[in-house]
Amino acid sequence: MFTLTRITVHHHQNTQHPPPAPPVWRFYQRNHPHSLWHGDLFEKVTLTDEDRTAYQLTLMDDYSRAYVYCDLLREPTQNDTIRAMIAAMRRYQTIPKGVVFDNGSQFKGYLLSAFCSNLGIRLIHSSVRHPQTNGKLERAFRDDRREYYDQFDEWIFDELRQSLPEYVRYRNEVRGHYALDGKPSATRLAEQNWFALPSVLNSLEGFARHPLGSTKVDLSCCIRVLGRNGYIPKLRYRQSVSLNETLDGLEAMTEDGRVYLLRNYRRLKQVPSWHRDELPSRLNFEEYGEDHCPRIAVA
């Protein structure tokens, strides 16, 4: 005997969710020259004769759209970014209030962070996968491609780099910009009414200084650096040595105030771990008598 079971099927209406709201892009613009600089690399310069890419390292002022620094490099580094900022600060006799970079290795690192912090500069990095943060500079790069690079039949490094300053002068002083009602960047740069102290501008390299702590001299009268013996003259066993990374290299200061420098420290540090056995067994520091200790520039 079979029992008939009644099955009730409930039909649910298809619930349609509203589409997500489109992203809201917030336009921002500073109101004074050198309040904010944008920094980035234009990476689409493939050299004709070298079969490699060159990089246009650029710093652009947000308010005026002026290029405060622009140069063509083969292998830009974090140090190149710091030196670019220094050159722009001296050129315009100013300290920017903030800088915006993407997340490339040239724009991140302890030394760049220390440099900005010591000068009171706000260091801002764009959100990952959000290029709109630096959109003004991205649009400027499209203009550079059309108005500068496409004017050359071949992309030869020396030729491109030699002619770049004249293009930057034209871009800043002659060419009008849509965002500036057709006026050139120089009209807004002329509104600058604050200038940094010469004493600060003359010592900018010293603000790029990242403390690495201290170490003790071992029985071989050396200090350990990158797994090697670092030789400094007249060291005594168990003497303390303070270490700082600087633009020039690894700076070592002894207890009696002597200063020495390992100039190729950054290059040595970038050697992959599996090639560290190729490093020399002893790293020699050279005497470095100048005082590069900075004072904080902004209270």
Image (spheres, rainbow, N blue to C red):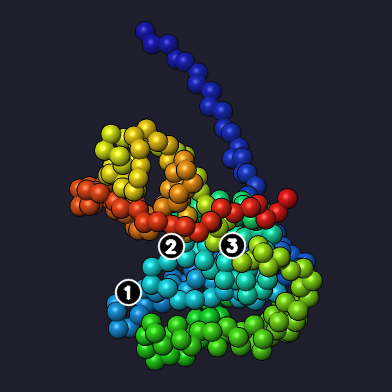
The residue beneath circle 2 is: 77
Q: The N terminus is located in which quarter?
A: top left
Image disc number at residue 204: 3
In this view, the mark in front (1 or 2): 2
Circles 3 and 1, Cβ within 8 Å, touching? The answer is no
Measuring from the top left, give residue 279's x and y in whole percent.
23, 52
- The three-letter code of the residue at mark 3 reads Leu
In this view, the mark in front (2 or 3): 3
Taking the spot 61% from the left edge, 37% from the top edge, the residue there is 13
- Quote the CA–CA distance across marks 1 and 2: 17 Å
- In the current view of this chain or complex, which residue is farthest to the top? 1
Q: Secondary structure at mark 2?
A: loop
- Quote the CA–CA distance across marks 2 and 3: 18 Å
Q: Quadrant of residue 119 in the image?
A: bottom right
- The three-letter code of the residue at mark 1 reads Arg
Q: Residues within 10 Å of mark 2 (few under 14, many from 20)?
A: some
